[in-house]
């Protein structure tokens, strides 16, 4: 039987203006795709900076009583590392991916407010520059949580803490404007036929991410403004000696800080929910349950902040309430993981790099989720909080929920952004190295914490096996870094010599694959009618049906809503 | 500094063996650990099985299943039931972790004579209401311990020590944790959980040590550049030895205070009265 290769849907664009080139086209652009690329490149550079800081932390802790860096520099390193990864990498990287792909996935020609979108990016960059400029003077050293009174002017007199405050303000404003933009885009600019029940799951998570940002960012903005006023304008919000409350800072910070965790991981969950069905060749299992669990996690995420404060002087009733709400949030999270496994079940799983990263992400996140149950149980938290156990926990959650999913997204979408495929061999190598690196670095840190080593100490004694355990962790961090390097090499190589991708290399489900790779400035000449949660699958089937059916020539009518689908 | 004792004994569980509350936390941890390991094995096993068993083969057709309401409801309820069981278990064990036990026979007499205090929602007392009260005060970068026995009003003249807290065995010790500068966190792993010392607030915990020995820990929340060196040791000794130590400590402090008084007077005579603001 002669095999018939289904034609790939291809947009035919007419009269499109030549794309502007050169550096001015980047700094003046309001195109969501260019802004998205700038977001991704910028945040990836910050990711590398944060990674270098992490390696220096691990080098210092590689042997007991090491003197590689001074306590001052050590405190600056972990403050910079934590702040960079949260505010300058994960959150804005998700914004970058969403910037590029939300309009494409919902069938829009740009974001709802293109110029506001550009402002979001430039505010982010300004925040990053202000923060990193502090390394030429005095970087902040009160940790990424800036607990007062340590972050107050009496104990952190240098301008580094102020640089941290301005970073929070600038990146916060950037996120806030971006969130409003995403919400408006998803709410108003969806393609014809794309009801809420047909919205891609990544768009569901970005919608939820936006709502979380809109509710959470004003709280941290208020908190750092109060801190700024305490530091420089003589107020006493956090000063116990003058009627303020040091505990208030912890409440405000974590009321933002816990939703922030979901701001970082929910878009990652969305990526997994997009990528698994494509490579299992099956629809997502339980679309509604996954969308609903996203919203449920976001709601519950606002009720659990005090589980970061189980050791603080707060009433027992609050401990009990927060323990129960934290347990409760494990239910929708668990539902997601089981739905993902059910999506793979009885599919035909293709082991491409994005799928491997997703499988790694689920495994790593699962470990982080389970160690979270220990931390949510407050009597256990009294022992393990503020130790390397919690360091391990948060890295499993964020590397599984965010870093691995971001890498899955990079491998999945790189062909759309550049028109070229990333190398599979290097991709698999990178994924394997990163996976082994994460497990080697962080599994042993649970034990380090259980053995009594607090976090944020620049030195420790070699009691028991602490020296050995820390050495293992340090070796792991370099394996992880090597894995990241392989992907950087892969990207650099593929930009020049990567295999041409074509519009839909993965035979995927969502509308971004309907247009060419890379997409033209206006994304789509015509936007197809959406008839299910997998519009591209419908279009491919329609083409196959029409190509194989006996066609009375010239009379084939285009089904309502389908668009010019050329070959 | 050698400030952690016998950690290699506890590869997978929190340190314990000093005080009943640490032991009970350790017990609760072990139960959660078993549940977590079983869930991990099942879920990860399911993931790996799905990946391997359903990998793309020639001729394999993916089943187009979009969901299964009964299955999904089932595992949602299942997850909730497991967590509910863990919550019930935690609350059942909470009292033995939080509520101090009575001092044992042969406990220190100070605990019964001067240890009377009022219980509050935050500060738990042993059933007979008697414990040895020690105030723990954190400051950059040292812990101060103030014992009962003030000789003047407002708690002045009470014996104190730095870095090493000496306590009697078989005696319930109730700690009142406070800070005089930034946030610190009191933690001796083998004697139970950690509690923050927040300026303007008080945290409370307790321990009861049965065997004499050294129990080591350190400040558990970032408090500045010297955080790693803010260590603490609890030295448990038989009650008689404790009473002797406390008396000696009190004696030394009062002698040092009188010497300082003499020195101040001398300095005052040299520089003129009213000039000695910083003796």
Image (tube, helix red, strand yellow):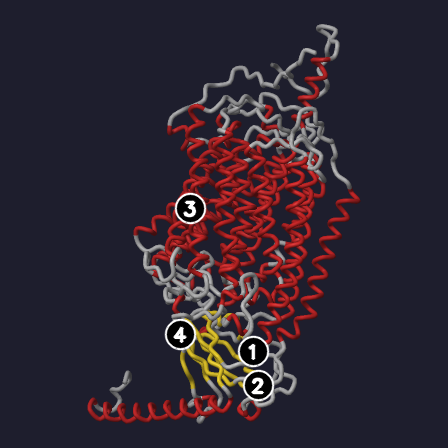
Q: Residue A516 occupies which quadrant of the picture?
A: top right
Left or right relative to A554: residue A136:
left
Q: Are marks 3 and 2 on the same chain?
A: no
In this rendered view, identify the residue nearer to me: B3 or A244: B3
Mark sitting on residue B206: 1
- Of pointers 4 and 2, the one earlier in the residue sequence: 2
The CA span between labels 4 and 2 is: 25 Å
Would you call the spot at circle 3 few (<14 residues within 10 Å), some (14-19), or many (20 or more)? many
Q: Residue A20 occupies which quadrant of the picture?
A: top left
Query: Residue A361: x percent and y percent?
Result: 57, 43
Residue in the image at 43% along x and 89% along y: B245
Q: Secondary structure at mark 4?
A: strand
Give me the chain letter of mark 1.
Answer: B
For marks 4 and 3, give the one nearer the viewer: 3
Q: Secondary structure at mark 3?
A: helix
Label 1 close to label 2 by CB (< 8 Å)? yes
Left or right relative to A520: residue B39:
right
Left or right relative to A551: residue A423:
left
Q: Are marks 4 and 3 on the same chain?
A: no
Mark sitting on residue A478: 3
What residue sits right under mark 4 in the picture? B142
Q: Residue B46 occupies which quadrant of the picture?
A: top right
Query: Residue A177: x percent and y percent?
Result: 52, 43
Query: Residue A247: x percent and y percent?
Result: 51, 67
Q: Residue furthest right?
A: B70
The CA span between labels 1 and 3 is: 42 Å
For marks 3 and 2, give the one nearer the viewer: 3
Q: Are marks 4 and 1 on the same chain?
A: yes
């Amino acid at each position: 039987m002669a095999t018939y290769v289904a034609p790939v849907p291809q947009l035919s664009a007419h009269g499109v203006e030549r794309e502007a080139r050169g550096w001015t086209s980047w700094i003046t652009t309001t195109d969501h795709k260019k802004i998205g690329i700038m977001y991704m490149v910028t945040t990836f550079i910050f990711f590398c900076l944060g990674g270098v800081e992490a390696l220096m932390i691990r080098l210092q802790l590689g042997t007991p009583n090491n003197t590689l860096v001074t306590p001052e520099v050590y405190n600056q390193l972990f403050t910079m590392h934590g702040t960079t990864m949260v505010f300058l990498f994960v959150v804005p990287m998700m914004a970058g991916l969403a910037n590029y792909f939300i309009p494409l996935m919902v069938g829009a020609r740009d974001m709802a407010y293109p110029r506001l979108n550009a402002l979001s990016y430039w505010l982010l960059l300004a925040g990053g520059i202000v923060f990193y400029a502090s390394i030429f003077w005095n970087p902040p050293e009160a940790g990424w949580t800036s607990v007062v009174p340590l972050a107050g002017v009496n104990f952190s007199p240098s301008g580094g803490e102020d640089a941290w405050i301005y970073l929070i303000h600038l990146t916060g404003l950037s996120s806030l404007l971006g969130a409003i933009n995403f919400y408006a885009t998803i709410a108003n600019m969806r393609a014809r036929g794309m009801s809420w029940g047909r919205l891609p799951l990544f768009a569901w998570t970005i919608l939820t991410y936006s709502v979380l940002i809109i509710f959470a960012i004003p709280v941290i903005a208020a908190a750092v403004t109060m801190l700024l006023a305490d530091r420089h304008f003589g107020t006493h919000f956090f000063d116990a000696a003058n009627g303020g409350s040091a505990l208030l800072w912890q409440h405000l910070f974590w009321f933002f800080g816990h939703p922030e965790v979901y701001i970082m991981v929910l878009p990652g969950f969305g990526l997994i929910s997009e990528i698994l069905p494509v490579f299992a060749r099956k629809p997502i299992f339980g679309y509604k349950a996954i969308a609903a669990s996203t919203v449920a996690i976001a709601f519950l995420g606002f009720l659990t902040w005090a589980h970061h404060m189980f050791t603080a002087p707060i009433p027992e009733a609050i401990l009990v309430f927060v323990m129960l709400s934290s347990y409760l949030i494990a239910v929708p999270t668990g539902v997601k993981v089981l739905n993902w496994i059910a999506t793979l079940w009885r599919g035909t799983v293709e082991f491409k790099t994005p799928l491997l990263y997703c499988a790694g992400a689920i495994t790593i996140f699962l470990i982080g989720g389970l160690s979270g149950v220990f931390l949510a149980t407050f009597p256990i938290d009294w022992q393990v909080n503020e130790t390397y156990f919690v360091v391990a926990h948060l890295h499993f959650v964020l590397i599984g929920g965010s870093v691995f999913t971001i890498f899955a997204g990079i491998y999945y979408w790189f062909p759309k952004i550049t028109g070229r495929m990333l190398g599979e061999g290097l991709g698999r190598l990178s994924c394997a190295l990163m996976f082994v690196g994460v497990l080697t670095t962080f599994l042993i840190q649970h034990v380090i914490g259980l053995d009594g080593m607090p976090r944020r100490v620049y030195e420790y004694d070699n009691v028991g096996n602490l020296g050995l355990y820390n050495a293992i962790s340090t070796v792991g961090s370099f394996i992880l870094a090597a894995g990241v390097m392989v992907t950087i090499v892969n990207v650099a190589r593929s930009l020049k010599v990567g295999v041409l991708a074509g519009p839909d290399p993965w035979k995927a489900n969502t509308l971004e694959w309907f247009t060419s790779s890379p997409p033209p400035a206006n994304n789509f000449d015509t936007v197809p009618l959406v008839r299910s949660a997998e519009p591209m699958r419908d279009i491919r089937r329609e083409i196959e049906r029409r190509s194989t059916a006996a066609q009375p020539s010239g009379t084939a009518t285009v089904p309502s809503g389908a668009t010019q689908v050329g070959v | 500094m050698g400030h952690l004792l016998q950690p290699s004994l506890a590869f997978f569980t929190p340190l314990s063996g000093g005080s009943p509350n640490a032991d009970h936390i350790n017990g609760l941890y072990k139960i959660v650990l078993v549940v977590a390991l079983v869930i991990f094995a099942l879920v990860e096993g399911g993931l790996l099985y799905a990946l391997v068993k359903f990998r793309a083969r020639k001729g394999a057709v993916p089943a187009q299943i979009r969901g299964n309401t009964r299955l999904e409801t089932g595992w949602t309820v299942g997850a909730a039931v497991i967590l509910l069981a863990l919550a019930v278990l935690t609350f059942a064990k909470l009292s033995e972790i939080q509520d101090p036990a009575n001092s044992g026979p042969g406990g220190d007499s100070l605990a019964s004579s001067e240890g009377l205090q009022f219980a509050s929602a935050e500060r738990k007392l042993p059933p007979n209401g008697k414990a040895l009260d020690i105030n723990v005060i954190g400051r950059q970068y040292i812990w101060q311990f103030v014992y009962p026995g003030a000789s003047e009003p407002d708690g002045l003249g009470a014996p104190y020590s730095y870095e090493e807290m000496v306590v009697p065995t078989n005696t319930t010790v109730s700690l009142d944790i406070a800070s005089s500068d930034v946030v610190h966190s009191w933690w001796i792993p083998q004697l139970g959980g950690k509690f923050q010392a927040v300026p303007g607030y008080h945290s409370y915990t307790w321990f009861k040590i049965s065997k004499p020995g050294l129990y080591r820990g350190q400040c558990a929340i970032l408090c500045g550049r010297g955080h790693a060196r803010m260590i603490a040791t609890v030295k448990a000794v038989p009650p008689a030895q404790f009473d002797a130590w406390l008396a000696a400590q009190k004696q030394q402090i009062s002698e040092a205070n009188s010497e300082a008084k003499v020195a101040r007077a001398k300095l005052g005579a040299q520089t003129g009265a009213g000039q000695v603001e910083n003796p």
